[in-house]
Image (tube, rainbow, N blue to C red):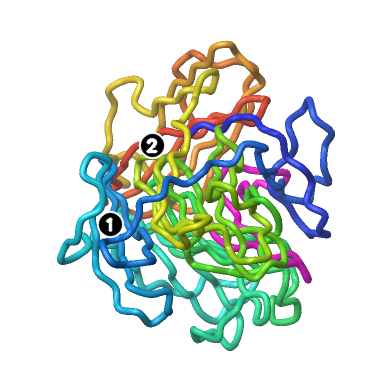
Amino acid sequence: MPYRRHTFVAVALALLAAGCDAPPTEPRADARRPRLATASATAILAQDLGVLPGDVRSEATYITEDGVVYGRSFASNSSDAPGRFFRWTSGGGMVQVSSIPQPLAPPKPTLSVPPPPPAFLKVLVAAANAKGEATGGLCTFDCDPPSYNPKNFGGHAFRSSPAAGARNIDLRFGDPPEFEPIPASRGWSINRWGHVAGAYWAFDSDPVVFFWTPLPGPRADLGQFVLVGTNSMSVDFNDMQVNDIDQVIGRAGGQVFDPCAFVWRPDLGTRELLSPGVECFNESGSPGRALAQQKTGTLVVGWGNFPGVGVHAALWSVPPVNRAGFPEVTANPIAFTSTISLARTGGRYFQFYRATQSPAAGPYLELVDWGDGTTSRRTRSSIGVTTSQNHVYTKTGTFWVRVYVQDAQGRWDAAERKLTVTP
């Protein structure tokens, strides 16, 4: 998805390797450090969805693509109070239902530990997408949940695909991780593009929510880590989610016990998700928590702490995606084959693509993720003409080939194509 330029501040952490450079018109941060997205001054305020009759507390846990919200409503504020299921619509409000829809999650693959260096002992899979790609943590010792913590025991986020297996995406140190357990990271969510959201530690810092794509920073093998949220996080929760429009939700807020919710998107930056009248840093309790979002839309649900009424199910209406002025990429500009044969072609494949932008903002970085764990990149001064990059596959399988084009301001777009390689 596109990437809109917005202001970043350098993370005040001594990292050993990097994410991405600041835009050319802004002061450059240390090239070893990922960028930290700063919160917008404009928070997004929650809509109170209420409770079922006779209840005092509720939370929303699921939202459909057409905006129907589901959750639970409780008769008391006790943590062990039994709940009733509800459905909420903008026209009908909240009504009791017998169950909440449970969309089937893609199965988590069983993965082998990638070869050293560095050396890892186990792969812990946290999430997968419908294409069989997955993310989670590569750990070094004491790897069994729930005790495993990447900061304490060493671990790195990974992305896997059926063709490439698990690949470490956090290459911040070269020594064996058992001797240097932190910095560390862990992936919690992966979308249809293979983009990852999770937790990112640096030495003795608290974890920060990250968003990762294959777009390279100063090190081509690292990919692009963008640290998102309103401040460094004090906890590592698996409710860090990225959806198919690259919208990330999570919790942040420094050293408070219940940090506040936020949303981040490449074209939006970071916005706090608050209840009306309650600030993010609130000593009396958390202002709210984002629990779910639409798969291809912008709406977010959870619970808010509404003054005078307490904890109620909440709906945050995040602004629509704004891609004006961004590069636009198509990976299918002409009709060409989606199947190649190792015997007939030697595995060589040409990926054609075309990118446009108005107004132009070159030079452009063009990266092709071949789906087998390798990428190709080049820089061009201008775009608009159909072009190609080529790659040699060495094994059969199904590969998702993804083309990224990024302009000089850091804005980007991606397109993909499915390729089958036969014997």
* Label 2–label 1 contact, CB within 8 A: no
Is the residue 359 above or below the residue 365 in the image?
A: above
Q: Which residue is mark 1?
A: 70
Image quadrant of residue 66? top left
Residue 24 is marked as none
Q: Give the residue at x 30% y 78%.
A: 82
From what the image shows, is residue 170 above or below residue 6?
below
The amino acid type of the residue labelled 1 equals Tyr
The type of residue carrying mark 2 is Glu
- Residue at 62 percent across and 62 percent down: it is 259
Residue 300 part of the magenta segment: no
The residue drawn where x is 32% and y is 59% is: 51
Residue 210 shown in magenta = yes
Residue 418 in percent (x, y) is at 31, 41
**Do we see residue 221 in this rendering?**
no
SS for dot 1: strand
User: What residue span does the magenta drawing correspond to?
Assistant: 198-224
Is residue 23 visible to us here?
yes
Q: Which residue is mark 2?
A: 416
Pinpoint residue 198: horizontal percent, then vertical percent: 55, 60
Nearer the observer, disc 2 or disc 1? 1
Q: CA distance from mark 2 to mark 1?
A: 33 Å
- Residue 9 position, x and y percent, is 77, 43
Along the viewing direction, whichever of 418 and 25 lies nearer the viewer: 25
Residue neighbourhood size for the residue with mark 1, other residues' Cα within 10 Å, grouped as few (<14), some (14–19), many (≥20): many
